[in-house]
Image: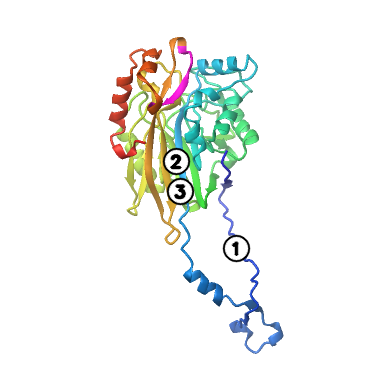
Amino acid sequence: MKKFISIIVSAVLLAGCAATDDNSSDSYVYIIPNDAVGSDPSEIREQPDDSENSENAENSEPLENPSVRLVCAGDNLIHSPIYKQANRRKGGSGYDFLPVYEDVKDIISSADLAVLNQETIITNEFEPSNYPHFCTPEDCGDQMIEIGFDAVSISNNHLLDQGEKGIKATLKYWSEKHPDVVVYGASEKAKEDDIPIAEINGITFAFLGFMEHTNGLSLPSGSDVSITYLKETERIKMLVEKADKLADVVVVSPHYGLEVSNEVTEEQKQITQNLVNWGADIIIGTQPHTAQPMEYVTKPDGGEAFVFYCLGNLVSAMDQPLGMLGMIGGLTVTKELDTGKIVLSDPEAIPIVTHYEKSYSNIKIYRFDNYTEELAEKHGCSNFGYSYAKKQFEKVLKVVDYLP
């Protein structure tokens, strides 16, 4: 895992003071403040003469603007064939999920900041379970961090699959086993207005996550757990505006859109524009389980935000052809030191295919660049084919420059 500073910012902000190094020069000047006129000279402070340093600073090269390469992945949707295969790799004692992600691991590990949507709760307090009420072994979460993910959104429709106890268990797992990982999209009620902040390469990122629904499940009245639905417009506006004041870059993960559709809805577009108007910079969408388009969105000040409407599945054992097609998004975030302006550049979409064979055997993610017609012929999903996949990716990724 990459190293970066992670803090939770609440309503109280702390102001920091910069320390200065001792000056080795023997040249000093006396600084006489206005209220020191008439004072005993012995009481007047002696300070280093910075004239030589100032002259050197003027002649030095300007500091390079800091930048962060961000990558983001869609739903890590752990159906039973995935965790059962992982269990068999360990001889029935533990789970080895790593071979599934082998072909995309370097994309994740090489990023400065890698963001994942963990679509299933992760805990060992419940037995592993499949759709419709998922639960995933903790080994999976551990190995996602081993691969290189730094931030994990848990804002999705399966968050309450194991009820209040399940969400508490997954929050406990992340906070106790991976306290340096940014986990967002749910929290303890007492911390519901706290915003996770991470500093990477001198740029601060705030993270927020919201979902359309939780499959008809809800928290009990008076629960000490907090989640926020996209219909809670005023609360979301408050949180995004607050995050915008606290960080250079606001990342929002909305779980929205029609399932198994690569068409962006008008509702997705309106929610996205609202988030941008309130201060969001990067929107990482999930829910439709397949790749959707991406684009720049104009901010009220004339700047640009960027939206991945849906990244699709990182992995799954779905049985629909569109569910086999996802992407890993990429974006460079640069902070201009002279203006403080954030610039988003070099957007990238790396198409990926979830491959499995008969009876969901040999589940693995492939970059489409590394996927072959021979592999596609073995795919266990009916009506899936190489030409089908290529056509769908070309349809979704209309801006050629976004392709790797």
Name the residue beneath numbered marker 1.
18
Residue 288 shows in the view: no
Query: In terms of sequence position, does the residue under pointer 2 or pointer 1 come before the other?
Result: 1
Single out the mark in the foreground, 2 or 3: 3
Q: Secondary structure at mark 1?
A: loop
Name the residue beneath numbered marker 3.
249
Near-viewer residue (64 or 161): 64
> If the image is split into quadrants, where does the N terminus sit?
top right
Q: Position of residue 131 (x, y in %)?
A: 49, 17
Q: Inspect the image, locate mark 2, and give the three-letter code of the amino acid beneath it.
A: Val
Name the residue beneath numbered marker 2.
252
Q: Is residue 262 above or below residue 233?
A: above
Q: Quadrant of residue 257?
A: top left
Whether the residues at callouts 2 and 3 have beta carbons within 8 Å, the answer is: no
Q: Inspect the image, locate mark 1, and give the three-letter code of the amino acid beneath it.
A: Ala
Crowd band around label 2 with a 10 angstrom C-alpha radius: few (<14), some (14–19), many (20+): many
Q: Position of residue 323 (x, y in %)?
A: 39, 22
Single out the residue that lies furthest toward the top: 359
